[in-house]
Amino acid sequence: MNSLGILKDKFGNIIGQMIKYGLVGITNTLITVIVLFVLQNAFGVSYKLANGAGYICGFINSFILNKLWTFKGNQKSTLNQFIRFALVFVGCYAVQLGFVILLVEQIHIEKNISQLIGMVFYTLVSFLLNKMFTFKD
């Protein structure tokens, strides 16, 4: 195969992974939002604790779907990938939660809106890190 063909295959694979990652992200977001908003609004759980519970549920779903579907061509050790995935999650989550706290407590943006803004930020950063670090070829 010539260089152009290899480039097309590589680019096509990345686009496919981005689409799959996006679909997994939609699923994770729905799970996270449902858990987070139910705990926060129906049960009166603090927004910080509800945020953590929602993201943990999304994290578990995300690892399973991304390992088995999005990046399925990469058959590295599941334990190694889980550890890397967890490191990315913890780093992205910490930054995201700090951002949400800043939005709620300092900028005084409504807590539900702040949670949604934080989710967008988290998703973009986590895709890049998971592509380049967790599930790299």
Image (cartoon, rainbow, N blue to C red):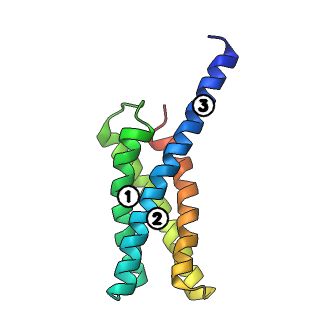
Disc 2 on helix, strand or loop? helix
Q: Is residue 52 among what the camera can see?
A: no
Determine whether label 2 and label 1 are within 8 Å by CB: yes
Determine whether label 2 and label 3 are within 8 Å by CB: no
Which circle's residue, 2 or 1, is located before the other in the chain?
A: 1
Q: Is residue 38 among what the camera can see?
A: yes
Q: Residue at x 41, y 45 (%)?
A: 66
Residue 44, percent across and down? 35, 89
**Which residue is most to the left?**
79
Q: Is residue 107 left or right of residue 78?
A: right
Disc 3 on helix, strand or loop? helix
Closer-to-camera residue (74/5)? 5
The quadrant of the image that shows the N terminus is: top right
Distance between mark 2 and mark 1 Cα atoms? 10 Å
Callout 1 crowding tier (Cα within 10 Å): few <14, some 14–19, many ≥20: many
Which circle's residue, 1 or 3, is located before the other in the chain?
A: 3
Residue tagged 3: 12
Residue tagged 2: 93
Give the amino acid type for the residue marked by disc 1 in the picture: Phe
Disc 2 versus disc 3: nearer the observer: 3
Q: Residue at x 29, y 42 (%)?
A: 79
Give the amino acid type for the residue marked by disc 2 in the picture: Tyr
Callout 3 crowding tier (Cα within 10 Å): few <14, some 14–19, many ≥20: few
Residue tagged 1: 59
